Image (cartoon, helix red, strand yellow):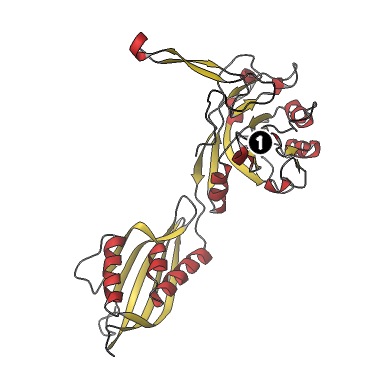
Amino acid sequence: MDLSVPLRTGMPVYPGDPEVRITPALTADGDGANVLALALGSHSGTHLDAPFHVHDAFPALDALPPAQFNGPVELVDVRSAGPGGVITAEHLAGIRPAAPGDGRAGHPDRILLLHTGFASHWGSPEYLDHPWLHADAAQLIVDRGYRTVGLDALSVDRTAGQVFPAHHILAANGCVIVENLTGLEQIERAAAGGAGVEVFLFPLSIPDADGAPIRAMARLAGTAPLSRAEVQDAADRLVAAFASTDTERYFAAFSPSATFIFHPEPESLGSRSEYREVWETWVGSGWKVLDCRSSEQNIQMLGTTAIFTHRVATLVRTGPGPRTLASDERETIIFTRTETGDVVAVHEHLSAVPAAAEDS
């Protein structure tokens, strides 16, 4: 997941900062190679502030441990602060402590990201009227052990102000600040699905620097195991869609690459599209589920995968006439959690229940 704004000539900068200019210095046609000339400030685009940014006695960029630029994300939705609003300690009251990951002071496990929603105003005058961090909120961040904090706004302090209390509180405690992030809704969606997210915020290597542009990236660090309730809910929805002959809901419950083994068919159906074609042929000929009852359910939990089995008794109308057909079958459905957090079926196996005398 890319969390960076691209560097472009004339892009927005903090009022008073150097403008960004990117021009060709050499060309492949004229010089044998393409080379750009870059003119920009150390806080252009998505960037990282070293503590030295606000005080000469604080550490410069090259004095910071690389561990501060990478780690799991603790994301807080502060969009309720609104334009020009204050992000208070109350907004951040629920953040977990950033416990040391390796037992060494100054190397917290988590990086705090604040989702203001203001990335949507990037490039417009409204971007200057962003939410800002109250001094008490900055102190709470420090007290919870965070040493890296970022947000999708121009600054942690009010842009119109002449003082920078949040910067000073954070910097005095060794925190780095990342500003002008974008795309934090990607992380929010992943977290809502139970996935952990790891973020990478590595700055350019500039000795004695007060900050530098970064390419902020994130990736899924792991997917939460399925819960029994999630699997039961997914199975109930799939069975209900089948019982109502709702093809859209039924196939939406499966992965696009799901496989199907269905005993009335002469061959296994290798894809959802093949199964859907058969299903819609049945429905088009007047096939309709009259009754569908699930019993003897069992769920086997396997981390991010689960196996759901049940006995399903189905009564169907097989055509336009009054003829009906009853079946008693065993069904196995394999569910998994996707990287976006959705629970989908990836395999369905439907077989006839053996006669009692043959059933071992």
Q: Residue furthest left?
A: 266
Q: Quadrant of residue 154?
A: top right
Q: Residue at x 58, y 16 (%)?
A: 206
Q: Please, what is the three-letter code of the amino acid marked with disc 1?
A: Tyr
**Disc 1 secondary structure class:** helix
Where is residue 73? Give x, y as percent. 59, 41
In the rendered view, does 338 fall on the left or right side of 356?
Answer: right
Q: Quadrant of residue 204?
A: top right
Where is residue 267? Give x, y as percent. 20, 66
Q: Residue at x 36, y 69 (%)?
A: 332
Where is residue 9? Give x, y as percent. 54, 23
Q: Nearer the viewer, residue 225 or 132?
A: 132
Q: Please, is residue 185 above or below residue 241 in the view?
A: above
Residue corresponding to mark 1 = 127
Q: Residues within 10 Å of mark 1 (few under 14, many from 20)?
A: some
Q: Please, is residue 135 above or below residue 210 in the view?
A: below
Q: Residue at x 74, y 47 (%)?
A: 91
The total of numbered circles placed on residues is 1
Q: Quadrant of the C terminus?
A: bottom left
In the rendered image, is residue 97 in sight? yes
Where is residue 175? Give x, y as percent. 69, 29
Q: Residue furthest top?
A: 31
Q: Residue furthest front?
A: 125
In the rendered view, does 347 fall on the left or right side of 160?
Answer: left
In the rendered image, is residue 110 in sight? no
Q: Quadrant of residue 324?
A: bottom left
Q: Please, is residue 244 above or below residue 158 in the view?
A: below
In the rendered view, does 360 fall on the left or right side of 85?
Answer: left
Q: Nearer the viewer, residue 231 or 215?
A: 215
